[in-house]
Image (cartoon, rainbow, N blue to C red):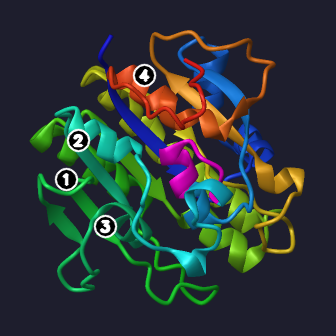
């Protein structure tokens, strides 16, 4: 079966924070409109390595991106490249790191924010840089604006695979800590925007998956082995049935899961999917 997929990555949003703050997502689970599992990430629990792990199904030590400072273009088969090779259309609303990974050209801060090229792995995109973010100014796009850009890309280009990547929870976590009111409130802000967007995306025919790349500890940090860093949620709005809700999922199975739902054969090196 071939489906269209929107994947939402709430950067830095840990499992417990989402379960306690995401009233819309948790309400959908309670009503049977969505399924939710705990997902265990790979390590090191850093953003760049996890973006590539999510899209290649490989541990960072296998795909070779093991730090944010070591970011480069992806060298392994990934969701974007395999979907494009299968004549699917890809799109993203995401941080500039995704441009570095899946758009094979230099980043131009004044031109690369809007991207349309059928020859690149991400074919249609709205990128943002968050240049200079910190406690003084998060410089994060509003969550509803990100959802709006996803909706417009879906309406204008009908991508088969569409990524929404929000950095705001990670930013507030680094500024105030993963046990702060600012961090928890921002996770709720993401949930609040999704409450208006997901029904529209579902009506447009998309399966919707919502997860995180990693969590955040109280010391404003991630990258290690703490449970609060490695445990993230995985919500699924769609018709497929996954494992028992009490079973923890591996982040490494997400790439194959997305491709299976798209009707695209995963790469042989990818871990098996779970839907």
Q: Do the residues labelled 2 and 3 touch (CB within 8 Å)?
A: no
Residue 29, given in percent of the width and then of the height, sits at: 63, 20
* Tag in front: 3 or 1: 1
Find the distance from the CA under tag 3 to the CA under tag 1.
12 Å
Q: Is 52 colored magenta in this rendering?
A: yes
Number of the front mark, 2 or 3:
2
- Residue 7, percent across and down? 44, 40
Q: Residues within 10 Å of mark 4 (few under 14, many from 20)?
A: some
Image quarter of residue 185: bottom right
**Residue underneath mark 3:** 127
Q: How far apart are marks 4 and 1 (CA)?
A: 20 Å
Number of numbered discs present? 4
Q: Is residue 30 above or below residue 37?
A: above
| Image location (x, y in percent) of residue 55 | 48, 46
Compare marks 2 and 4 and give the one earlier in the sequence.
2
Find numbered disc 3 in the image and state the secondary structure of the residue it sits on: strand
Residue 139 on image: x %, y %: 46, 79
- Numbered range of the magenta stretch: 51-60
Q: Return the residue at label 2.
A: 84
Task: Name the residue beneath numbered marker 4.
Answer: 260
**Which quarter of the figure is the C terminus placed in?**
top right
Mark 1 residue element: loop
């Amino acid at each position: 079966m071939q489906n269209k997929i929107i994947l939402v990555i709430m950067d830095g949003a840990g499992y417990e924070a989402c379960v306690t703050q995401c009233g819309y997502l948790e309400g959908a689970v309670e009503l049977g409109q969505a399924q939710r599992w705990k997902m265990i990430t790979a390590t090191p629990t850093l953003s760049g390595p996890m973006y590539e792990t999510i899209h290649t199904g490989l541990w960072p030590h296998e795909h070779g991106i093991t730090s944010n400072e070591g970011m480069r273009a992806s060298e392994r088969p990934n969701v974007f490249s395999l979907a494009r090779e299968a004549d699917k259309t890809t799109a993203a609303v995401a941080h500039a790191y995704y441009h570095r990974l899946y758009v094979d050209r230099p980043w131009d801060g004044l031109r690369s924010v809007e991207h349309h090229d059928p020859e690149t792995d991400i074919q249609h995109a709205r990128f943002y840089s968050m240049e200079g973010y910190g406690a003084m100014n998060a410089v994060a796009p509003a969550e509803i604006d990100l959802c709006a850009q996803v909706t417009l890309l879906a309406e204008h280009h009908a991508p088969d695979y569409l990524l929404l990547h929000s950095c705001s929870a990670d930013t507030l976590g680094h500024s105030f800590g993963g046990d702060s009111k600012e961090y928890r409130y921002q996770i709720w802000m993401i949930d609040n925007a999704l409450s208006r967007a997901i029904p529209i995306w579902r009506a447009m025919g998309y399966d919707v998956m919502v997860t995180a790349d990693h969590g955040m500890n109280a010391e404003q940090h991630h990258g290690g082995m703490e449970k609060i860093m490695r445990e993230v949620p995985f919500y699924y709005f769609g018709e497929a049935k996954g494992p028992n809700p009490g079973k923890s999922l591996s982040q490494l199975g997400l790439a194959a899961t997305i491709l299976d739902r798209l009707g695209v054969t995963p790469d042989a090196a990818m871990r098996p999917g779970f839907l």
